[in-house]
Image: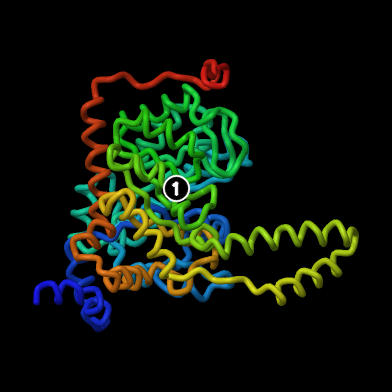
């Protein structure tokens, strides 16, 4: 009889009513804060609203704006969000000092949002802060700096960001920089330069997390080798399911248990779905072809592309495919090494069906429950894993407290390139 019950367990779980999943999710998220590793709301508010960002009502209704937002306070509440790393992103195309200025403005915006809505948000620095704020019924607000170029080749700037509350640094973004290779640009260093390794060590000393989303596999390898603390991928998916350069290979996933790190799964359709990625590539190729064929005829090009898109409708990623990425990380690296990193408001409306806003986290958790995930494992995914990583990084920082601040410069010889 016991064997029969075990054999039928997956089917019994799948047949459970939605109310059972909702009750389980309520119990889990009452104890464990649901923490998202990456949301671009501050940067998009700055870009779209200009000076209006300081006074725009953020409580509700942002889905009805001319360009809809994925985030507002009402939907954060509906999604049971307990903690959020707010990304402060600046394009790597901008001059270094401009990147620093805009980073500071976005950090200020995060702080001003928390000050304007103290019933909803409170700034957090540590894992203990997150748990305390969640217990008080507010959303713990953390800050992630999304691009190594934003430190303008200065460890002093990095330390200033830390003092202002930044909790992680993404080592690169879409472009390779002077000290680290990007996943979406030609490599120049084979990973990290000596200065890049110094950045990782300084992040460890400060207690900031080393974020490896957007970086090349060589940079991932070097950072995992150098870092004393667990690393994070704040918003990445898996290359085994969709071989996008932004995704994480199984070779890297297999290294995470020894490091203690975590991959927080991204929702962007092009990273989630191989079919969507192929369509994007095909469309770009067709656009390049039409541009050559119809030089000087913009209206004809526009009509040609409209006809192509009608004949080749864009496929959609699904909530189930996001769950597939989560399942894959749990299978290869272990359930202790996976989290959520939606990229909401960073990819517009290029989101999977069923995951269009911050209100939808419970639907994803319910899908995993239908697949047999236990309450304990759902809690790890939702927040316990990233809280463990934060706690470990804090302990490493304490152990390095007596070490002097790093003084490396990019001008030092790139030993790896020289070899």
* 363 with respect to 21 (left or right): right
Residue 37: x %, y % from top left: 37, 53
Number of dots carrying numbers: 1
Please state, as top left, top right, bottom left or bottom right, where the N terminus lies in the image: bottom left
How far from the left and from the top, in percent, is residue 339?
33, 55
Q: Residue furthest left?
A: 1
Q: Is residue 4 left or right of residue 66?
A: left
Determine which quarter of the picture holds residue 208: top left
Q: Is residue 62 visible?
A: yes
Q: Quadrant of the C terminus?
A: top right
Front residue of 364/64: it is 364
Residue, far right: 296
Q: Residue at x 44, y 50 (%)?
A: 87
Residue 398 position in % (x across, y down): 21, 30
On screen, 165 above or below 56?
above
Residue 411 image position (x, y, % from top left): 55, 18
Q: Residue at x 81, y 72 (%)?
A: 303
Who is closer to the viewer here, 295 or 202?
295
Residue at 9%, 73% (x, y): give it: 2
Task: Determine crowd level at label 1: few under 14, some 14-19, many 20+ residues with C-alpha closer than 10 A.
Answer: many
The answer to whether 115 appears left or right of 246 in the picture is left
Compared with 335, 192 (above or below) is above
Q: Is residue 167 visible?
A: no
Q: Secondary structure at mark 1?
A: loop
Q: Which residue is mark 1?
A: 248
């Amino acid at each position: 009889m016991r064997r029969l019950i075990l054999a039928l367990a997956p089917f019994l779980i799948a047949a459970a009513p939605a109310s059972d999943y909702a009750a389980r999710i309520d119990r889990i998220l009452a104890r464990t804060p649901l923490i998202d590793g990456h949301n671009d709301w501050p940067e998009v508010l700055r870009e779209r609203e200009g000076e209006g960002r300081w006074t725009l009502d953020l409580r509700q209704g942002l889905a009805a704006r001319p360009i809809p937002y994925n985030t507002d306070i009402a939907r954060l509440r509906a999604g049971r969000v307990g903690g959020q790393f707010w990304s402060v992103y600046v394009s790597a195309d901008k001059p270094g000092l401009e990147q620093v200025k805009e980073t500071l403005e976005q950090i200020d915006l995060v702080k001003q949002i928390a000050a304007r809505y103290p019933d909803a948000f409170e700034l957090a620095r540590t894992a203990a802060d997150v748990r305390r704020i969640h217990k008080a019924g507010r959303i713990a607000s953390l800050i992630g700096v999304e691009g190594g170029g934003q430190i303008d080749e200065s460890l002093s700037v990095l330390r200033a960001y830390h003092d202002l509350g930044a909790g992680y640094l993404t080592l690169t973004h879409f472009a390779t920089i002077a000290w680290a290779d990007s996943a979406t640009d030609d490599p120049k260093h084979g990973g990290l330069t000596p200065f890049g390794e110094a950045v990782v060590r300084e992040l460890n000393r400060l207690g900031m997390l080393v974020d490896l989303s957007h970086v090349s596999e060589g940079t991932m390898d070097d950072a995992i080798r150098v870092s004393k603390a667990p690393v994070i991928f704040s918003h990445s998916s898996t290359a085994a399911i969709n071989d996008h350069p932004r995704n994480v290979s199984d070779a890297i996933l297999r290294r995470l248990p020894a490091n203690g790190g975590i991959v927080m799964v991204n929702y962007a359709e092009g990273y989630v779905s191989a079919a969507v990625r192929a369509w994007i590539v095909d469309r770009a190729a067709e656009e390049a072809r039409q541009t050559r064929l119809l030089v000087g005829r913009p209206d004809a090009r526009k009509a040609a592309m409209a006809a192509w898109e009608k004949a080749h409708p864009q496929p959609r990623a699904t909530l189930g495919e996001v769950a597939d990425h989560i399942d894959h990380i749990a299978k290869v690296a272990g359930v202790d090494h996976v989290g959520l990193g939606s990229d909401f408001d960073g990819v517009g409306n290029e989101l999977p069906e069923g995951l269009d806003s911050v209100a939808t986290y419970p639907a994803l958790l319910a899908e995993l429950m239908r697949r047999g995930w236990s309450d304990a494992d759902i809690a790890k995914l939702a927040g316990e894993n990233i809280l463990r990583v934060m706690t470990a990084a804090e302990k490493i920082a304490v152990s390095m407290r007596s070490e002097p601040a790093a003084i490396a410069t990019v001008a030092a010889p790139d030993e790896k390139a020289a070899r």
